[in-house]
Image (cartoon, rainbow, N blue to C red):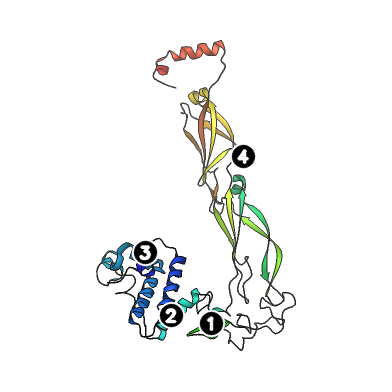
Amino acid sequence: MNKNPYEVLGVARDASDADIKKAYHKLVMKYHPDKNPGDKTAEEKFKDVNNAFDILKDPQKRAAYDRYGDAAFAGGNGASAGMGGNPFGNGAFHFDMGGGAGMEDILREAMRGFGFGGFDGATGARGANRQQRGRDLLDEVVISLRDAYFGKTHTVKFSSNVKCEKCNGYGTADGKPAPVCSRCHGTGYVNVQRGFFAMQTPCPECNGLGHKIDKKCPDCDGSGVIHKNRTLEVKIPAGIESGARLRLGGQGEAGVNGGVPGDFYLDVHIKPDEKFERDGANLVMHVDLPFTTLALGGDIDVETIDDKKLTVKVPSGTQVGEKLRVRGHGMPTGRGTSFGDLYIDIGITIPTKLTDKQKKILTDFAETKTAKKGWF
């Protein structure tokens, strides 16, 4: 039976990843076989600590344990039946405590937590000399509903690092990739023996870059990038929805070691309009009409979002709250080749001052059977 990984590491079930890692590094150093030679109890605890950490450091494994307990890692039955088979293989996790790759992985994980790097892609030695993609950049803009209808070009002004054109981003005077460092052979790290640990530190010859520039580019002083003010023209398409994100490929920060630049993103938000409400591709406008127009019918003039004048027929007997549909006068859809519809939400205007003649007409109507049945 596997031991409770939370109890082994001495952390709560809601512990953060940082707390779990901190507890792991503390215990793995305490029970390491090199510090406890011949101590079988320490060796067993060392195994338990690594088994526990291997479960809790992985979100999927941790979630499986939280839900199914030990059954999540038992082959053939238990959680495997309800989960369509054990997603982590049959049985518990195994560690090679006799050295080799298993021990190397354990020590590498421990050393990484103490800031000595490792062989991982983000901070490790083998990735030191690789080209790295530049950072993405993000901006946002608030536009009117009318701008969203017609589309517009938005100008963004900012400053960022861009690739030095003189050296192609390599930082060298001749614009070619710098030669590999002879000391670390391009890894960016050198091995250092500290007690019983063999650790890796940034190469002092190339400062961890993995390459050494003999003659620096005069424009960027060897950095491969220059900082400059930039202006981008972003085309906001007609019919765009609020919350949409536009991408301009390759317009982000410059890459490292000649790597490709990141992307530029623009988040578009649409402010409320005083006249129109948006419902997907459709627009809704509210119009108050006299009760006589609703009762007798008639024509009304409305103005669309693109400033067109329309005459709309109101059928007799139209009720308050009904919506009259005008096809093709909503927001653009697709690439502006089709449009949603315009809906006119009908309200009513009640006169506050009536002449004697008007009062008599309404009083006479109120006495009719139609009025008494609740026509209004």
Of the residues tagged 1 and 2, which is closer to the observer? 1
* Picture quarter with the C terminus: top left
Is label 1 in a helix, a strand or a loop? strand
In the displayed structure, 363 sits above or below 343; it is above
Q: CA distance from mark 1 to mark 2?
A: 14 Å
Q: Position of residue 305 (x, y in %)?
A: 60, 41
Q: Which residue is mark 1?
A: 200
Of the residues tagged 4 and 3, which is closer to the observer? 3
Identify the residue at image location x=51%, y=47%: 281
Q: Which mark is residue 105?
A: 2
In the displayed structure, 355 sits above or below 164; it is above
Q: Position of residue 200 (x, y in %)?
A: 53, 82
The type of residue carrying mark 3 is: Ala
Q: Earlier in the sequence, mark 3 or mark 1?
A: 3
Of the residues tagged 3 and 1, which is closer to the observer? 1
Nearest the viewer among 304 and 100 is: 100
Of the residues tagged 1 and 4, which is closer to the observer? 1
In the displayed structure, 372 sits above or below 135; it is above
Q: How would you rate the neighbour count of disc 2 (Cα within 10 Å): few for under 14, some for 14-19, many for 20 or more?
A: some
Q: Earlier in the sequence, mark 4 or mark 2?
A: 2
Q: Which residue is mark 4?
A: 308
Q: Which residue is mark 3?
A: 63
In the displayed structure, 35 sits above or below 78; it is below
Nearest the viewer among 118 and 158 is: 118
Identify the residue at image location x=66%, y=78%: 170
